[in-house]
Each structure stands twice: as C-alpha cells, then as structure tokens.
Amino acid sequence: AQSVAQPEDQVNVAEGNPLTVKCTYSVSGNPYLFWYVQYPNRGLQFLLKYITGDNLVKGSYGFEAEFNKSQTSFHLKKPSALVSDSALYFCAVMRGGGFKTIFGAGTRLFVKA
Amino acid sequence: ETGVTQTPRHLVMGMTNKKSLKCEQHLGHNAMYWYKQSAKKPLELMFVYSLEERVENNSVPSRFSPECPNSSHLFLHLHTLQPEDSALYLCASSQALGTALSNQPQHFGDGTRLSIL
C-alpha cells in the first residue's frame, strides 16, 4: 500500500531564511514523487516531481526537493523564503506504472516579513 | 489559468436537493479525477476515469454519482447529501494512466465549495 506522511502541520520561517517542508513515503516498487502548492480559494498547483535520475530536482518559484531512497524522504526546500510562499504544501506519491496518487495531509507554511 | 474549469465555485444545498458539479479540461488529457478536500484531512480520491472508463471507485457513498461523457468533461451528481459531505470538491486531469506518461502531474481546477444545510 502507498502512504505519505507530512509530519508537520505547520512550518514558520522568517523571510529570507531557508525553508524545509518534510515528507516521507511508503510505496512498493519505484516511486513517482510530487510536490504541489495550494493558495487560498484555489486548487493545487504542481511544483516539481521526481521520477528517476538526479536526486535533487528543481521546480517552480525557486523550490527544490531531494529524493533520499534510504530514508524514503522527499523534503521540499528553498534557500530564501518569500512572504508570498505562504501557502499549503502537499507531498504526493504514485507507484511507478500505477494510476493512483496518494497525497499527504498538507503542511501550512507561514513566512513572516 | 490551469486549463481545468469547475462550476459552480460555490454551492449551498439542502439534504434533499439534487445538484451536479461540472468539470471541463482544455488540456487534451485522457484521465480525470474527483477529490474531496476537508479541513485538516488528507486529500481523498473519490473517482478516477481513464479514457472515459472508471478505473477507481474509492468506496464512495452512492449519493455521489460520477459521469464522464467524454475525455474533456466530468460531472459529479449529488443527491440526498449529509452535513459531513460539506467540503471543497476538486477536479483534476492528467495526460494518461497506465502508460509511460502516467508520471505526469495532475492539473487541478479551483474547486467547488459545497455546503450542506
């Protein structure tokens, strides 16, 4: 069975500081991993994905994520946070070749000016 | 503009009403999804359609009835809903399932906020 855990309900960071939003997963076989962001009154927007290859993937708005197979993690990072990054972030996993994507519960990011 | 349009954006209905949610995608995708998003809960996958055939029905109560007349349109028919069904209902689409393109991300609409009185 597939599962995703986002251990933090909320992450607070000051503008200009680096941010990390944590995600761990469980899936049989090779995972496809995704990060999405949701702003108020909007749907989810795709940020980045890991399918295969380089463990560090870069995405939209300066975000990046590192795939760590041994720790089954896919943490989202950004070197310098912006107030406009404040939103709800979802990690998701799909088993390679499957058709069902499992989403985490979401982590709310607050960036203070 | 995500390429996925959901209507209406807001819906208030009584428990005995019948209404439908509509989703339309302009991305040429072959797979479409319905999700339920409730506060402080993970996103719940309700239904998945691939090439207009339902491939996933996640033990959803029969008061929710999906319809996919073609690969661009998806409906969710609602009847005799309960107060706990109040939530944000999100539609999404993706390029293909069960193929080499199944690793492509999903594109979401902005949802229908449903309130059951």
Image (cartoon, grey):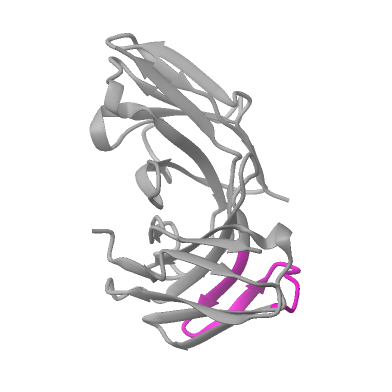
x, y percent for residue B16: 70, 79
Q: If the image is split into quadrants, where does the C terminus of chain A sit?
A: top left
Seen from the viewer's position, the closer of residues A42 and B70 is A42
Figure check: A45 above or below B64:
above
Figure check: A79 above or below B114:
above
Seen from the viewer's position, the closer of residues A53 and B45 is B45
x, y percent for residue A106: 55, 36
Figure check: A1 above or below B112:
above
Q: Residue at x 40, y 48 (%)?
A: A41
The quadrant holding residue A84 is top left
Q: Residue at x 68, y 62 (%)?
A: B85
Seen from the viewer's position, the closer of residues A53 and B86 is B86
Question: Does residue B5 appear in the picture of this structure?
Answer: yes
Question: Does residue A26 appear in the picture of this structure?
Answer: no
x, y percent for residue A82: 27, 20
Q: Residue at x 61, y 39 (%)?
A: A105
The quadrant holding residue B27 is bottom left
Figure check: B37 above or below B116:
above
Magenta span of residues: B46-63
Is residue B59 within the magenta segment?
yes
x, y percent for residue B71: 40, 83
Q: Residue at x 40, y 42 (%)?
A: A40
Residue B115 left/right relative to B10: right
Is residue B14 within the magenta segment?
no
Residue A83 left/right relative to B7: left
Seen from the viewer's position, the closer of residues A103 and B74 is B74
- How many numbered marks does the figure carry? 0
